[in-house]
Image (cartoon, rainbow, N blue to C red):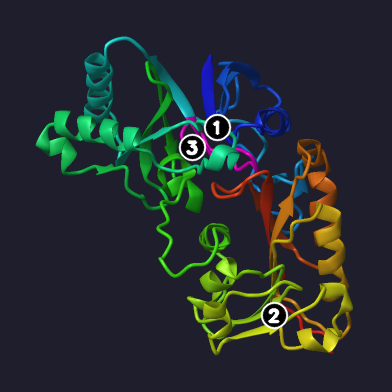
Amino acid sequence: MSYLFTCCQIGAEKFLKHELSELAPQAHFAFSRPGFVTFKFPEDRPATDRVGSQFDVGSAKTNSFGSITSSTRPCGFAPEEGVPKSIFARASGVSLERLTGDETQRIEKIVKELEDGDYQAFHVWSRDEKPSGKSGYEVGPTEEDDRVANLVRSALPSSVRNRLLINEPVVKGDRVLDCTIVDPDVWMTGFHRATFTATCYPGGMINLVMPPEVVSRAWYKMEEALIWSGLPLEPGARVAELGSSPGGATQALLSRGCQVLGVDPAEMAPIVLANPNFRHLRGRTTELPKKEFRKIRWLASDMNVAPNYTLDAVEDIVMNKQVSIRGLILTLKLVEWDLAWNIPQYLERIRSWGFNVIKARQLQHNRQEICVAALQTPFRRKS
């Protein structure tokens, strides 16, 4: 048997299992812990199979969560990649070994694998301790991750250590030895090939440091969304942000030189209002004249409402004949976990507006929500 490991936010496991069952029907659920799920595959699986991509381009075909499987790249499992581009799998790879017992012996096994294998990097991270946001818990790198990484670094011969990146971002194409700290005395090793942005970071987590002047944690979500999505926002891009108060996400956009129109009935932070590239429309989105959006090309939304309310507000803008929107960054709040079953309908609705490149992911800094990035390419302005 071959095994695939996946890490996700605690609470998302059943949706991840369902997603993988459609991306790779030959997979069977195996060992798991909250936030860590493995799947086994039969030995006779086709070596050329690939786990489906989450992009929707051209004639690609969606599965029920909006991930895409191309007819020219059959759904399955690629031992050399080990990366299902799913919405809920934050990190994944081919499982190698469950390490238990004496910590020194665990380190020795990792060192031997790094010496013998063709790796460009070693990544170690801990599975989530709690559901994101519970008791103030923030998902991200831990002191334990650093401690284990340093133990491995110290135990490696200099000839191996000098050619490896250890708990640092890699470039696409690099082969990475992974170690998930599942429990204090249980580590799971595996590997993956970095194939898209999130897979370049340990555990799929971007180690962001929030500047001291930032006014809310929404900065994390927007900053991560911009890095992950790769949307081509350039300095001077005109962006409307729905639900902008108090302005954390706005600050992430302003730091990139964007011109931001913030829409929110609540007040914005004074530091945001003072920025000459920001303008505040104080009111509800549905009450504003659409002429305010004529020059807007990018639309972001992080409103604390159920997904259909967000999509109603966005559709009211993007489908207006006066407005030409090139791309979207939307946070869809799963106010109840079971709303995740409706993700296919949410993505299909966005697609119906004319956005032909769509991807979705539960970001590291998302809580009980997902991020959707959408792009119209080529971009056609309305007459």
Location of residue 10 by image quarter:
top right
Q: Check disc 1 and give the amino acid type.
A: Lys
Q: 68 or 327, which lies in front?
A: 327
Residue 74 is at least partly visible in this image: yes
Q: Cα distance, mark 3 to mark 1?
A: 29 Å
- Please tell me how crowded label 2 is: few (under 14), some (14-19), or many (20+) other residues with Cα within 10 Å: many
Q: Earlier in the sequence, mark 3 or mark 1?
A: 3
Q: Which one is in front in this view, the residue at disc 3 or the one at disc 1?
A: 1
Region in magenta:
80-93
Which percent across, then down, holds residue 44? 59, 17
Q: Quadrant of residue 309?
A: bottom right
> Which residue is depicted at the point 52% across and 58% down?
220
Q: Position of residue 257 (x, y in %)?
A: 50, 81
Residue 102 shown left or right of residue 312 in the figure = left
* 21 is within the stretch colored magenta: no
Cβ atoms at labels 1 and 2 below 8 Å apart: no
Q: Quadrant of the C terminus?
A: bottom right
| Residue 84 visible in this rendered orientation of the protein | no
Q: The residue under label 3 is which amino acid type?
A: Glu
Q: Find residue 99 and report its horizontal and vertical position in percent.
A: 36, 15
How far is mark 1 from mark 2, CA to CA?
Answer: 38 Å
The residue where tag 3 is placed is: 81
Which of the marked residues, 1 or 2, is nearer the chain's N terminus?
A: 1
Q: Report the disc number at residue 297.
A: 2
Asked whether 81 falls inside the magenta stretch, the response is yes
Q: Which mark is residue 130?
A: 1
